[in-house]
Protein backbone atom coordinates (compact mmCIF):
# COMPACT_ATOMS: atom_id res chain seq x y z
CA UNK A 1 0.00 0.00 0.00
CA UNK A 2 1.09 3.59 -0.47
CA UNK A 3 0.40 6.73 1.48
CA UNK A 4 -2.68 8.70 0.42
CA UNK A 5 -3.68 12.23 1.27
CA UNK A 6 -7.46 12.12 0.99
CA UNK A 7 -9.17 12.29 4.34
CA UNK A 8 -6.34 14.09 6.10
CA UNK A 9 -7.44 16.56 8.78
CA UNK A 10 -7.16 20.19 7.73
CA UNK A 11 -5.70 21.11 11.10
CA UNK A 12 -2.57 19.38 12.29
CA UNK A 13 -2.19 16.64 9.66
CA UNK A 14 -0.20 13.64 10.87
CA UNK A 15 3.54 13.70 10.49
CA UNK A 16 4.93 11.29 7.86
CA UNK A 17 7.94 9.77 9.60
CA UNK A 18 11.20 9.61 7.72
CA UNK A 19 11.63 6.23 9.38
CA UNK A 20 8.53 4.32 10.45
CA UNK A 21 10.66 2.19 12.77
CA UNK A 22 12.25 5.07 14.71
CA UNK A 23 11.34 5.93 18.30
CA UNK A 24 11.43 9.67 18.98
CA UNK A 25 13.34 10.00 22.30
CA UNK A 26 11.13 12.78 23.70
CA UNK A 27 7.96 10.73 23.15
CA UNK A 28 9.04 7.24 24.22
CA UNK A 29 10.28 6.01 27.64
CA UNK A 30 13.93 6.69 28.34
CA UNK A 31 14.89 3.00 28.34
CA UNK A 32 13.06 2.19 25.10
CA UNK A 33 14.77 1.04 21.93
CA UNK A 34 14.73 -1.79 19.41
CA UNK A 35 16.48 -5.15 19.53
CA UNK A 36 16.11 -7.89 16.94
CA UNK A 37 13.61 -5.60 15.25
CA UNK A 38 11.20 -5.39 18.20
CA UNK A 39 10.60 -2.51 20.57
CA UNK A 40 12.16 -2.99 23.99
CA UNK A 41 11.29 -1.18 27.21
CA UNK A 42 13.28 -1.57 30.40
CA UNK A 43 15.43 -4.11 28.60
CA UNK A 44 12.47 -6.37 27.73
CA UNK A 45 11.20 -7.30 24.27
CA UNK A 46 7.53 -6.33 23.89
CA UNK A 47 6.87 -9.68 22.22
CA UNK A 48 7.86 -11.36 25.47
CA UNK A 49 5.64 -9.00 27.45
CA UNK A 50 2.66 -9.72 25.21
CA UNK A 51 3.27 -13.47 25.37
CA UNK A 52 3.52 -13.53 29.18
CA UNK A 53 0.93 -10.93 30.15
CA UNK A 54 -1.40 -10.65 27.14
CA UNK A 55 -2.75 -7.60 25.37
CA UNK A 56 -3.92 -4.90 25.69
CA UNK A 57 -1.20 -4.20 28.22
CA UNK A 58 -0.11 -1.05 30.01
CA UNK A 59 3.68 -1.02 30.40
CA UNK A 60 5.33 1.41 32.84
CA UNK A 61 9.06 2.13 32.64
CA UNK A 62 9.92 2.33 36.34
CA UNK A 63 13.30 3.99 35.84
CA UNK A 64 11.78 6.63 33.55
CA UNK A 65 9.09 7.37 36.14
CA UNK A 66 11.54 7.58 39.02
CA UNK A 67 14.05 9.71 37.09
CA UNK A 68 11.39 12.33 36.41
CA UNK A 69 10.53 12.40 40.12
CA UNK A 70 14.18 13.09 40.86
CA UNK A 71 14.35 15.87 38.27
CA UNK A 72 11.43 17.67 39.91
CA UNK A 73 12.96 17.23 43.34
CA UNK A 74 16.21 18.76 42.11
CA UNK A 75 14.58 21.67 40.27
CA UNK A 76 12.36 22.56 43.26
CA UNK A 77 15.00 21.77 45.88
CA UNK A 78 13.85 24.65 48.08
CA UNK A 79 10.15 23.79 47.80
CA UNK A 80 7.82 20.81 47.66
CA UNK A 81 6.83 18.49 44.83
CA UNK A 82 3.55 16.60 45.17
CA UNK A 83 2.69 13.98 42.58
CA UNK A 84 -0.87 14.36 41.23
CA UNK A 85 -2.39 10.92 41.84
CA UNK A 86 -5.20 11.42 39.33
CA UNK A 87 -2.69 10.95 36.49
CA UNK A 88 -2.07 7.34 37.52
CA UNK A 89 -2.10 5.77 40.95
CA UNK A 90 -1.81 2.28 42.32
CA UNK A 91 -0.19 0.91 45.46
CA UNK A 92 3.18 0.33 43.79
CA UNK A 93 3.28 3.84 42.32
CA UNK A 94 2.48 5.24 45.77
CA UNK A 95 5.53 3.36 47.06
CA UNK A 96 7.72 4.85 44.30
CA UNK A 97 6.51 8.36 45.12
CA UNK A 98 7.25 7.82 48.80
CA UNK A 99 10.71 6.39 48.11
CA UNK A 100 11.59 9.30 45.83
CA UNK A 101 10.64 11.79 48.54
CA UNK A 102 7.66 13.42 46.86
CA UNK A 103 4.35 14.33 48.39
CA UNK A 104 1.04 13.10 47.00
CA UNK A 105 -2.13 14.88 45.89
CA UNK A 106 -5.38 12.95 46.18
CA UNK A 107 -8.90 14.05 45.32
CA UNK A 108 -11.11 11.27 46.67
CA UNK A 109 -11.42 8.90 49.59
CA UNK A 110 -10.42 6.09 47.23
CA UNK A 111 -7.14 7.71 46.23
CA UNK A 112 -6.45 8.48 49.88
CA UNK A 113 -7.14 4.84 50.77
CA UNK A 114 -4.61 3.62 48.20
CA UNK A 115 -1.93 5.88 49.67
CA UNK A 116 -2.66 4.99 53.28
CA UNK A 117 -2.77 1.26 52.47
CA UNK A 118 0.99 1.27 51.77
CA UNK A 119 1.89 3.48 54.71
CA UNK A 120 2.38 6.68 52.73
CA UNK A 121 3.11 9.43 55.31
CA UNK A 122 -0.20 11.31 55.70
CA UNK A 123 1.58 14.57 56.48
CA UNK A 124 2.88 14.52 52.87
CA UNK A 125 -0.62 14.15 51.41
CA UNK A 126 -2.78 17.02 50.14
CA UNK A 127 -6.53 16.49 49.75
CA UNK A 128 -8.18 18.12 46.71
CA UNK A 129 -11.66 18.06 45.20
CA UNK A 130 -14.42 20.50 44.29
CA UNK A 131 -17.16 18.61 46.15
CA UNK A 132 -15.59 16.70 49.01
CA UNK A 133 -18.23 14.94 51.05
CA UNK A 134 -18.36 15.22 54.81
CA UNK A 135 -17.18 11.60 54.98
CA UNK A 136 -14.20 12.30 52.72
CA UNK A 137 -13.21 15.35 54.71
CA UNK A 138 -13.55 13.41 57.95
CA UNK A 139 -11.30 10.66 56.58
CA UNK A 140 -8.71 13.28 55.61
CA UNK A 141 -8.91 15.02 58.98
CA UNK A 142 -8.65 11.84 61.04
CA UNK A 143 -5.82 10.48 58.88
CA UNK A 144 -3.86 13.67 59.54
CA UNK A 145 -3.24 14.70 55.94
CA UNK A 146 -0.81 17.56 55.59
CA UNK A 147 -3.07 19.96 53.71
CA UNK A 148 -6.70 20.24 52.66
CA UNK A 149 -7.37 22.55 49.72
CA UNK A 150 -10.77 24.18 50.25
CA UNK A 151 -12.88 24.80 47.17
CA UNK A 152 -16.05 26.41 48.55
CA UNK A 153 -17.59 28.24 51.50
CA UNK A 154 -19.51 25.06 52.40
CA UNK A 155 -16.26 23.19 52.77
CA UNK A 156 -14.92 25.79 55.18
CA UNK A 157 -17.95 25.26 57.41
CA UNK A 158 -17.67 21.47 57.16
CA UNK A 159 -14.01 21.55 58.12
CA UNK A 160 -14.69 23.83 61.04
CA UNK A 161 -17.30 21.36 62.32
CA UNK A 162 -14.98 18.37 61.88
CA UNK A 163 -12.05 20.13 63.52
CA UNK A 164 -14.21 20.78 66.57
CA UNK A 165 -15.52 17.23 66.57
CA UNK A 166 -12.09 15.61 66.49
CA UNK A 167 -10.10 18.18 68.43
CA UNK A 168 -7.61 18.83 65.62
CA UNK A 169 -6.50 21.91 63.69
CA UNK A 170 -6.05 20.95 60.02
CA UNK A 171 -3.87 23.00 57.71
CA UNK A 172 -5.88 24.41 54.84
CA UNK A 173 -5.21 26.23 51.60
CA UNK A 174 -7.65 28.10 49.39
CA UNK A 175 -7.99 27.11 45.74
CA UNK A 176 -8.02 30.42 43.89
CA UNK A 177 -9.44 30.80 40.40
CA UNK A 178 -6.96 33.32 39.04
CA UNK A 179 -8.69 34.08 35.73
CA UNK A 180 -6.01 32.62 33.45
CA UNK A 181 -7.21 31.28 30.09
CA UNK A 182 -4.85 28.33 29.69
CA UNK A 183 -4.00 27.39 26.10
CA UNK A 184 -5.42 23.88 26.25
CA UNK A 185 -8.65 21.99 25.61
CA UNK A 186 -11.79 23.44 27.22
CA UNK A 187 -12.35 20.30 29.29
CA UNK A 188 -8.92 20.54 30.98
CA UNK A 189 -8.70 24.31 31.49
CA UNK A 190 -9.47 25.05 35.12
CA UNK A 191 -8.55 28.63 36.07
CA UNK A 192 -11.04 30.80 34.17
CA UNK A 193 -14.03 32.01 36.16
CA UNK A 194 -16.77 30.11 34.32
CA UNK A 195 -16.08 26.59 35.64
CA UNK A 196 -16.59 24.50 38.75
CA UNK A 197 -13.23 24.76 40.49
CA UNK A 198 -12.04 27.19 43.09
CA UNK A 199 -12.97 30.62 44.43
CA UNK A 200 -12.72 33.55 42.08
CA UNK A 201 -10.01 36.13 42.59
CA UNK A 202 -11.71 38.79 40.47
CA UNK A 203 -15.12 38.52 42.18
CA UNK A 204 -13.65 38.74 45.68
CA UNK A 205 -14.74 35.20 46.60
CA UNK A 206 -11.17 34.15 47.37
CA UNK A 207 -10.66 37.14 49.65
CA UNK A 208 -13.93 36.32 51.42
CA UNK A 209 -12.75 32.73 51.91
CA UNK A 210 -9.64 34.09 53.62
CA UNK A 211 -11.84 36.09 56.00
CA UNK A 212 -14.04 33.10 56.84
CA UNK A 213 -11.14 30.76 57.55
CA UNK A 214 -9.31 33.29 59.68
CA UNK A 215 -12.52 33.71 61.69
CA UNK A 216 -12.37 30.01 62.62
CA UNK A 217 -9.52 29.43 65.08
CA UNK A 218 -9.89 25.66 64.67
CA UNK A 219 -8.55 25.94 61.08
CA UNK A 220 -4.98 26.92 60.19
CA UNK A 221 -4.77 28.85 56.93
CA UNK A 222 -1.28 28.25 55.56
CA UNK A 223 -1.46 29.34 51.95
CA UNK A 224 -3.05 29.72 48.54
CA UNK A 225 -3.42 27.23 45.71
CA UNK A 226 -3.96 27.52 41.96
CA UNK A 227 -4.18 25.03 39.11
CA UNK A 228 -4.71 26.58 35.69
CA UNK A 229 -5.28 23.42 33.65
CA UNK A 230 -3.63 20.42 32.09
CA UNK A 231 -1.34 19.60 29.14
CA UNK A 232 0.03 23.15 29.04
CA UNK A 233 3.30 23.87 27.24
CA UNK A 234 3.21 27.67 27.37
CA UNK A 235 4.86 29.05 30.51
CA UNK A 236 3.02 32.36 30.22
CA UNK A 237 -0.09 31.12 32.03
CA UNK A 238 1.90 29.81 34.98
CA UNK A 239 3.73 33.12 35.25
CA UNK A 240 0.50 35.13 35.28
CA UNK A 241 -1.01 32.82 37.91
CA UNK A 242 2.09 33.06 40.11
CA UNK A 243 2.08 36.84 39.92
CA UNK A 244 -1.62 37.12 40.82
CA UNK A 245 -1.37 34.72 43.73
CA UNK A 246 1.66 36.52 45.08
CA UNK A 247 -0.29 39.78 44.96
CA UNK A 248 -3.12 38.14 46.89
CA UNK A 249 -0.59 37.19 49.56
CA UNK A 250 0.26 40.87 49.81
CA UNK A 251 -3.43 41.82 50.14
CA UNK A 252 -3.92 39.24 52.90
CA UNK A 253 -1.02 40.77 54.81
CA UNK A 254 -2.40 44.29 54.34
CA UNK A 255 -5.98 43.41 55.40
CA UNK A 256 -5.34 40.88 58.16
CA UNK A 257 -1.70 41.37 59.14
CA UNK A 258 -1.24 37.67 58.40
CA UNK A 259 1.68 36.26 56.44
CA UNK A 260 0.82 33.02 54.65
CA UNK A 261 3.93 30.84 54.39
CA UNK A 262 2.96 28.61 51.44
CA UNK A 263 2.04 28.97 47.78
CA UNK A 264 0.94 25.98 45.70
CA UNK A 265 1.10 26.67 41.96
CA UNK A 266 -0.41 23.36 40.88
CA UNK A 267 0.62 21.30 37.90
CA UNK A 268 -0.58 20.81 34.35
CA UNK A 269 2.82 20.68 32.67
CA UNK A 270 2.47 19.20 29.21
CA UNK A 271 4.37 16.41 27.50
CA UNK A 272 5.01 15.70 23.80
CA UNK A 273 2.63 13.17 22.26
CA UNK A 274 3.58 13.55 18.58
CA UNK A 275 6.58 14.90 16.69
CA UNK A 276 6.54 18.69 16.87
CA UNK A 277 4.89 18.93 20.29
CA UNK A 278 6.65 21.17 22.76
CA UNK A 279 7.62 20.16 26.26
CA UNK A 280 8.59 22.21 29.26
CA UNK A 281 12.02 22.13 30.89
CA UNK A 282 11.51 21.44 34.60
CA UNK A 283 14.41 23.65 35.67
CA UNK A 284 13.17 26.54 33.52
CA UNK A 285 9.73 26.22 35.13
CA UNK A 286 11.20 26.17 38.63
CA UNK A 287 13.52 29.12 38.07
CA UNK A 288 10.81 31.21 36.41
CA UNK A 289 8.17 30.66 39.07
CA UNK A 290 10.65 31.23 41.87
CA UNK A 291 11.80 34.52 40.32
CA UNK A 292 8.28 35.88 39.88
CA UNK A 293 7.10 35.07 43.40
CA UNK A 294 10.32 36.36 44.93
CA UNK A 295 10.12 39.65 43.07
CA UNK A 296 6.48 40.36 44.01
CA UNK A 297 6.88 39.39 47.67
CA UNK A 298 10.18 41.14 48.27
CA UNK A 299 8.88 44.36 46.71
CA UNK A 300 6.01 44.25 49.23
CA UNK A 301 8.28 43.45 52.17
CA UNK A 302 6.93 39.91 52.54
CA UNK A 303 9.02 36.79 53.11
CA UNK A 304 9.05 34.53 50.08
CA UNK A 305 6.59 31.66 50.61
CA UNK A 306 7.54 28.03 50.23
CA UNK A 307 6.54 26.91 46.73
CA UNK A 308 4.77 23.65 45.94
CA UNK A 309 4.08 22.19 42.49
CA UNK A 310 1.91 19.23 41.52
CA UNK A 311 3.20 17.40 38.43
CA UNK A 312 1.33 14.30 37.35
CA UNK A 313 1.31 13.78 33.59
CA UNK A 314 4.86 15.12 33.23
CA UNK A 315 6.09 12.34 35.53
CA UNK A 316 3.86 9.43 34.50
CA UNK A 317 2.93 10.23 30.91
CA UNK A 318 5.98 9.38 28.84
CA UNK A 319 6.89 6.47 31.14
CA UNK A 320 3.83 4.55 29.95
CA UNK A 321 3.22 2.61 26.72
CA UNK A 322 0.19 0.54 25.72
CA UNK A 323 0.65 -2.65 23.72
CA UNK A 324 -2.11 -3.91 21.43
CA UNK A 325 -2.47 -6.74 18.96
CA UNK A 326 -3.84 -5.85 15.54
CA UNK A 327 -7.00 -7.81 14.75
CA UNK A 328 -8.28 -6.55 11.41
CA UNK A 329 -6.77 -4.34 8.72
CA UNK A 330 -9.46 -2.76 6.55
CA UNK A 331 -8.54 -0.56 3.60
CA UNK A 332 -11.07 2.12 2.65
CA UNK A 333 -9.93 2.94 -0.87
CA UNK A 334 -9.00 6.55 -1.45
CA UNK A 335 -9.28 7.45 2.22
CA UNK A 336 -7.30 5.45 4.77
CA UNK A 337 -6.72 2.04 6.29
CA UNK A 338 -8.51 1.14 9.51
CA UNK A 339 -6.36 -0.93 11.86
CA UNK A 340 -8.46 -2.42 14.64
CA UNK A 341 -6.83 -3.47 17.91
CA UNK A 342 -7.97 -5.54 20.88
CA UNK A 343 -8.67 -2.57 23.12
CA UNK A 344 -9.84 0.98 22.49
CA UNK A 345 -11.85 3.57 24.33
CA UNK A 346 -12.16 1.33 27.40
CA UNK A 347 -8.39 1.55 28.03
CA UNK A 348 -7.81 4.98 26.43
CA UNK A 349 -10.82 7.26 26.25
CA UNK A 350 -8.79 10.45 25.83
CA UNK A 351 -8.98 10.48 22.05
CA UNK A 352 -12.77 10.19 22.09
CA UNK A 353 -13.12 12.53 25.07
CA UNK A 354 -11.12 15.52 23.86
CA UNK A 355 -9.33 14.65 20.65
CA UNK A 356 -6.00 13.63 22.17
CA UNK A 357 -3.15 12.85 19.76
CA UNK A 358 -0.75 9.91 20.05
CA UNK A 359 2.24 8.32 18.37
CA UNK A 360 2.11 4.62 17.57
CA UNK A 361 4.50 2.20 15.86
CA UNK A 362 4.62 -1.36 14.63
CA UNK A 363 6.36 -2.86 17.66
CA UNK A 364 6.89 -6.57 17.03
CA UNK A 365 9.16 -6.14 13.98
CA UNK A 366 10.69 -3.57 11.68
CA UNK A 367 9.28 -2.90 8.23
CA UNK A 368 10.60 -1.24 5.11
CA UNK A 369 7.14 -0.99 3.54
CA UNK A 370 5.79 2.32 2.35
CA UNK A 371 3.75 4.32 4.87
CA UNK A 372 -0.02 4.03 4.73
CA UNK A 373 -2.39 6.62 6.14
CA UNK A 374 -4.13 4.81 8.97
CA UNK A 375 -6.64 5.18 11.76
CA UNK A 376 -5.96 3.06 14.82
CA UNK A 377 -9.35 2.08 16.20
CA UNK A 378 -10.73 -0.06 18.98
CA UNK A 379 -13.25 -2.88 19.13
CA UNK A 380 -16.11 -1.01 20.82
CA UNK A 381 -19.50 -0.30 19.31
CA UNK A 382 -18.83 3.40 18.73
CA UNK A 383 -17.60 5.09 15.56
CA UNK A 384 -15.69 7.49 17.82
CA UNK A 385 -13.74 4.59 19.33
CA UNK A 386 -10.30 5.71 18.15
CA UNK A 387 -6.92 5.28 19.75
CA UNK A 388 -5.03 7.36 17.17
CA UNK A 389 -7.18 9.32 14.76
CA UNK A 390 -4.61 9.80 11.99
CA UNK A 391 -1.13 8.31 11.66
CA UNK A 392 1.14 6.50 9.24
CA UNK A 393 1.88 2.81 9.72
CA UNK A 394 3.81 0.41 7.48
CA UNK A 395 1.84 -0.77 4.46
CA UNK A 396 2.51 -4.44 5.25
CA UNK A 397 1.01 -4.31 8.76
CA UNK A 398 -1.05 -7.45 9.30
CA UNK A 399 -3.32 -9.10 11.87
CA UNK A 400 -1.29 -10.45 14.76
CA UNK A 401 1.28 -7.65 14.68
CA UNK A 402 1.91 -5.80 17.93
CA UNK A 403 1.36 -2.05 17.98
CA UNK A 404 2.77 0.18 20.72
CA UNK A 405 1.17 3.53 21.57
CA UNK A 406 3.43 6.00 23.38
CA UNK A 407 2.60 8.50 26.11
CA UNK A 408 -0.17 6.50 27.77
CA UNK A 409 1.20 6.52 31.31
CA UNK A 410 -1.08 9.35 32.47
CA UNK A 411 -4.89 9.31 32.54
CA UNK A 412 -5.35 6.20 30.39
CA UNK A 413 -5.55 3.67 33.24
CA UNK A 414 -7.12 6.31 35.51
CA UNK A 415 -9.98 6.84 33.03
CA UNK A 416 -10.28 3.18 32.02
CA UNK A 417 -13.79 1.71 31.94
CA UNK A 418 -15.65 -1.48 31.17
CA UNK A 419 -17.63 -0.35 28.14
CA UNK A 420 -19.02 -3.38 26.27
CA UNK A 421 -17.92 -5.35 29.35
CA UNK A 422 -14.27 -5.43 28.38
CA UNK A 423 -12.03 -6.22 31.36
CA UNK A 424 -9.42 -3.57 32.16
CA UNK A 425 -5.87 -4.47 31.08
CA UNK A 426 -3.05 -5.37 33.42
CA UNK A 427 -0.34 -2.87 34.31
CA UNK A 428 3.22 -4.17 34.22
CA UNK A 429 6.28 -2.35 35.55
CA UNK A 430 9.56 -3.01 33.74
CA UNK A 431 13.07 -2.30 34.96
CA UNK A 432 16.52 -3.72 34.20
CA UNK A 433 15.19 -6.67 32.23
CA UNK A 434 12.58 -7.62 34.84
CA UNK A 435 8.80 -7.29 34.56
CA UNK A 436 6.18 -7.60 37.27
CA UNK A 437 2.45 -7.04 37.43
CA UNK A 438 1.47 -4.07 39.58
CA UNK A 439 -2.25 -4.18 38.67
CA UNK A 440 -3.59 -7.54 37.52
CA UNK A 441 -5.79 -7.92 34.47
CA UNK A 442 -9.50 -7.98 35.22
CA UNK A 443 -11.45 -11.14 34.49
CA UNK A 444 -15.05 -11.80 33.57
CA UNK A 445 -15.58 -12.85 37.18
CA UNK A 446 -14.48 -9.35 38.22
CA UNK A 447 -17.06 -7.86 35.86
CA UNK A 448 -19.83 -9.96 37.37
CA UNK A 449 -18.82 -9.37 40.99
CA UNK A 450 -21.36 -7.22 42.78
CA UNK A 451 -24.22 -8.05 40.43
CA UNK A 452 -27.28 -9.77 41.93
Image (cartoon, helix red, strand yellow):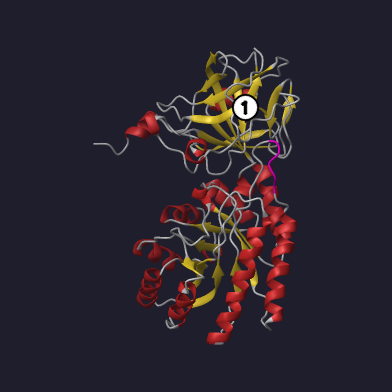
Give 221 or 41, whichever is nearer the viewer: 221
User: In the image, is 392 to the left or to the right of 189?
Assistant: right
According to the picture, the residue beneath numbered tag 1 turns out to be 391
Q: Secondary structure at mark 1?
A: strand
Residue 238 in picture, x, y percent from top left: 64, 60
Residue at the (68%, 75%) spot, across then down: 296
x, y (%) of residue 156? 41, 72
Locate the C terminus by quadrant: top left
Quarter of the figure that contains the N terminus: top right
Is 381 positioned to the left or the right of 432 in the image? left
Up-down: is 380 above or below 144? above
Locate residue 7: give its quadrant. top right
**How would you classify the magenta stretch by its main secondary structure?**
loop
Q: Residue 114: give x, y in percent of width and height.
A: 47, 52
Farthest residue toward the bottom?
Answer: 257
* 232 versus 365 height, above or below: below
Can residue 168 be seen from the camera position used here?
yes
> What percent of the width, then of the height, locates residue 61?
65, 39
Residue 274 left/right relative to 156: right
**Total marks drawn?**
1
Query: Most extreme residue toward the left, as rendered?
Result: 452
What residue is drawn where x is 39% and y is 60%?
131
Q: Magenta residues, as a range?
A: 275-279
Crowd around label 1: few <14 · some 14–19 · many ≥20 (10 Å): many
Q: Quadrant of residue 278?
A: top right
Q: Quadrant of residue 142?
A: bottom left
Up the image or down, 298 lies above or below 69; here it is below
Q: Please report the residue visible at 67 percent of the width from the left and 77 percent of the height from the top.
A: 297
- Relative depth, front residue between 282 and 9: 9
Q: Is residue 144 visible?
A: no
Magenta stretch: residue 208 in it? Answer: no
Does 88 sit above or below residue 349? below
Amino acid sequence: MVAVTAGLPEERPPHVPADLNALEPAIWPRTSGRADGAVTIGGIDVRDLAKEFGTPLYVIDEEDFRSRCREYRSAFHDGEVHYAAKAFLCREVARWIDQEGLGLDVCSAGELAVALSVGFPPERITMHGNNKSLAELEKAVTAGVGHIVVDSYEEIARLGFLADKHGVRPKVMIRVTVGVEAHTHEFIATAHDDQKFGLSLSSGAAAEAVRRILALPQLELVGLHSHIGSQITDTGGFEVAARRLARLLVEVKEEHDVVLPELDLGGGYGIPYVVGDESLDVKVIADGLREIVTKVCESAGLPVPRLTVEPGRSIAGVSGVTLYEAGTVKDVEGLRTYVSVDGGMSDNIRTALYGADYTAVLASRVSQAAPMLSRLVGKHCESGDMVVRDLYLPGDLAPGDLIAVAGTGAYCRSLANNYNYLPKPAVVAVSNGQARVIIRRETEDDLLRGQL
